Amino acid sequence: MYPIESNILFADRYRLIKRIGRGGFAEVWLADDTLTDLQVAIKIYDGMDEAGLKIFVGEIKKVYHLNHTNVRKPQHVAAWNNMPYLVMTYCSAGSLEKKIGQITEQEVWKILHDVASGLAYLHSNNIIHQDIKPANILQDDMGNYVIIDFGISTLARDTLLKSTKRGYTNAGTLAYMAPERFSSNYAPIFASDIWSLGAMLFELLEGVTPFPSD
């Protein structure tokens, strides 16, 4: 994998400024787009082979038709040095992680409205998020809460896991997973996203998740 560090010119276009997030097999960077002179967020995934890249990019392209106030889709999908990456609008307010345990009742109602609205739209397009949590909800410049990191299907996640030789194959984050997610024969269902939304709201209000991940 090509070393990712600040100040490199990623994909011969994006000057990386600082890492603003990190997940199981990806990092999110704030970057300057040298072509448009705009700041963007880039999610850079671990490297994979040609077959894996084809599957990954093909899955992401399925969400390009989506358009909703509370859903933030990638603006661009490509690969560089065998690393798939997504270019997204940068939300300077950041994610809900910074508001855990420090939120008002009025804010919670706004979050519930916006995230539920975004989820209803995704579900109406037969997309199950599988990883609703504070880190995947951003606040845009208009004050709306938007869902990110959707459209990464089980197939695409499995491709990433196999490429990086990691053994954990159940997409999502343990503390927000619904009970059925722990079944040996689990298949994604819409209801699991609703459970995760409830667990997230509980944590925002109480400062802790309803069921510790251990």
Image (cartoon, helix red, strand yellow):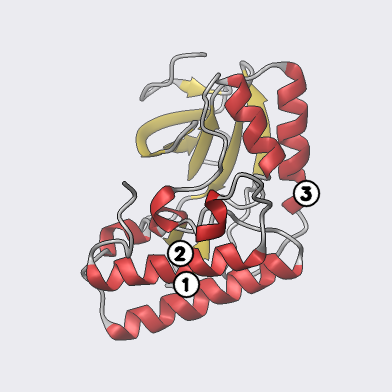
Q: Amino acid at mark 2?
A: Asp
Q: Amino acid at mark 3?
A: Lys
* Residue pointed to by mark 2: 140
* Residue pointed to by mark 1: 144
Q: Secondary structure at mark 2?
A: loop
Name of the residue lying farthest toward the front: 184
**Residue 168 in the image: x percent, y percent?**
51, 32
* Residue pointed to by mark 3: 62
Marks 1 & 2, CB-CB < 8 Å contact: yes
Marks 2 & 3, CB-CB < 8 Å contact: no
Q: CA distance from mark 2 to mark 3?
A: 23 Å
Q: Residue at x 51, y 38 (%)?
A: 42
Q: Amino acid at mark 1?
A: Asn
Q: Residue 79, located in which quarter of the rendered image?
A: top right
29 left or right, relative to 191? left
Q: Residue at x 38, y 23 (%)?
A: 7
Q: CA distance from mark 1 to mark 3?
A: 24 Å
